[in-house]
């Protein structure tokens, strides 16, 4: 029953519109959903808090403020970003406040999803953003931009669904979506456990963590899946990282994402 409740929250967990009601998830006019807190996650949250009390080699600087001067201006014009296809496969190193991990994306697994992930990474979309929803034993989710102007620009940039060709097992990376068709935006999540029940619900993996899964396991999960103990996605979308800095300062975040083998990206990541 606990797993089913967690899966239900993931189905309805994307960017929330305005308002911070603690009610069941409900899509707004843009098709993005507000999140309901899962009271049965308390046990996992307490364990995660204990685990997070002794971070190893964690970055103590805290979440960055991604002002307009810190973002790639192209992110404000999605049409300029969503061009071209991803390579057949590519690896991206995620440099985070807990260390580095590498994801291998494969276009044959989910071509539309792989294209979107490649486009976002190339445009520096994920730089400076938080792992805002971490549920130990289930998954770690990220994808709401640290700057609200960028979030606003991307709120309607959905991609069509891909067929599910791989399973949501440990380490697989998948786009989050609502229970509506063709609702994927910018959110990705990393499976902690064997979440194969998500396969039949249309969650198509686009990549897999091939190095550094132990880093993913260290991401702070003490705030749970959402309100009342964790971030409200509507507030995060509207306010950006300052909302997290004030209310959820222990969250881990992505410093940079480097596409391995891309010489310009390698220089950027050094």
Image (spheres, rainbow, N blue to C red):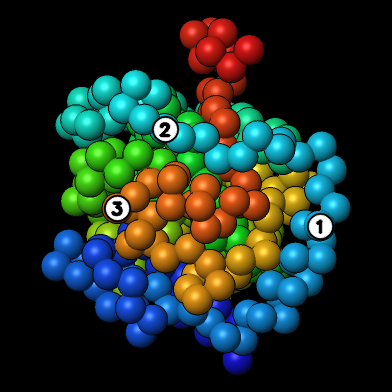
Residue labelled with disc 3: 238
Residue occupying image coordinates x 53% and y 82%:
38
Q: Who comes first in sequence, dot 2 or dot 3?
A: 2
Give above or below for 50 relative to 175: below
Can residue 161 be seen by looking at this rendering?
no
| Residue 122 place in picture, x, y as percent | 41, 25
As rendered, which of 72 and 80 lies closer to the eye?
A: 72
Q: Who comes first in sequence, dot 2 or dot 1?
A: 1
Indicate the secondary structure of the residue bearing disc 2: loop
| Residue 143 place in picture, x, y as percent | 43, 48
Label 1: few (<14), some (14–19) or many (≥20) C-alpha neighbours in 10 Å: few
Q: Is 186 situated left or right of 44 in this image?
A: left
As rendered, which of 215 and 161 lies closer to the eye?
A: 215
Residue labelled with disc 1: 53
Indicate the secondary structure of the residue bearing disc 3: helix
On the rendered image, what quadrant is the C terminus found in? top right
| Residue 66 circle label | 2
Can residue 170 be seen by looking at this rendering?
yes
Q: Quadrant of residue 96?
A: top right
Marks 2 & 1, CB-CB < 8 Å contact: no
| Residue 89 circle label | none
On the rendered image, what quadrant is the N terminus found in? bottom right
Give me the C-alpha separation between circle 2 and circle 1: 27 Å
Give above or below for 11 relative to 144: below
Check the image and name the residue furthest to the left: 29
As rendered, which of 208 and 47 lies closer to the eye?
A: 47
Q: Who comes first in sequence, dot 1 or dot 3?
A: 1
Give me the C-alpha separation between circle 2 and circle 3: 13 Å
């Amino acid at each position: 029953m606990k797993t089913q409740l967690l899966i239900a929250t993931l189905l309805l967990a994307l960017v929330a519109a305005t308002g911070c009601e603690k009610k069941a998830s409900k899509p707004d006019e843009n098709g993005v959903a507000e999140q309901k807190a899962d009271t049965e996650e308390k046990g996992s949250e307490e364990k995660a808090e204990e685990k997070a009390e002794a971070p190893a080699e964690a970055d103590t600087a805290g979440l960055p403020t991604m002002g307009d001067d810190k973002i790639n201006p192209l992110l404000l014009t999605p049409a300029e970003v969503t061009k071209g296809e991803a390579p057949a496969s590519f690896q991206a190193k995620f440099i985070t406040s807990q260390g580095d991990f590498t994801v291998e994306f494969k276009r044959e697994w989910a071509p539309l999803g792989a294209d979107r992930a490649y486009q976002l990474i190339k445009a520096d979309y994920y730089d400076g953003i938080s792992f805002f929803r971490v549920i130990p034993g289930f998954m770690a989710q990220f994808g709401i931009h640290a700057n609200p102007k960028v979030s606003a620009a991307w709120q309607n940039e959905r991609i069509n669904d891909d067929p599910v060709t791989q399973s949501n097992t440990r380490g697989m990376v998948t786009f989050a979506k609502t229970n509506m068709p063709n609702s994927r935006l910018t959110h990705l999540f990393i499976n902690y456990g064997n979440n194969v029940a998500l396969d039949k619900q249309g969650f198509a993996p686009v990549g897999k963590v091939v190095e550094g899964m132990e880093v993913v396991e260290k991401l702070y999960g003490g705030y749970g899946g959402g309100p009342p103990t964790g971030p409200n996605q509507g507030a995060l979308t509207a306010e950006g990282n300052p909302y997290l800095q004030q209310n959820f300062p222990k969250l881990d975040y992505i410093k940079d994402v480097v596409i391995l083998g891309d010489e310009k990206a390698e220089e950027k990541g050094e």
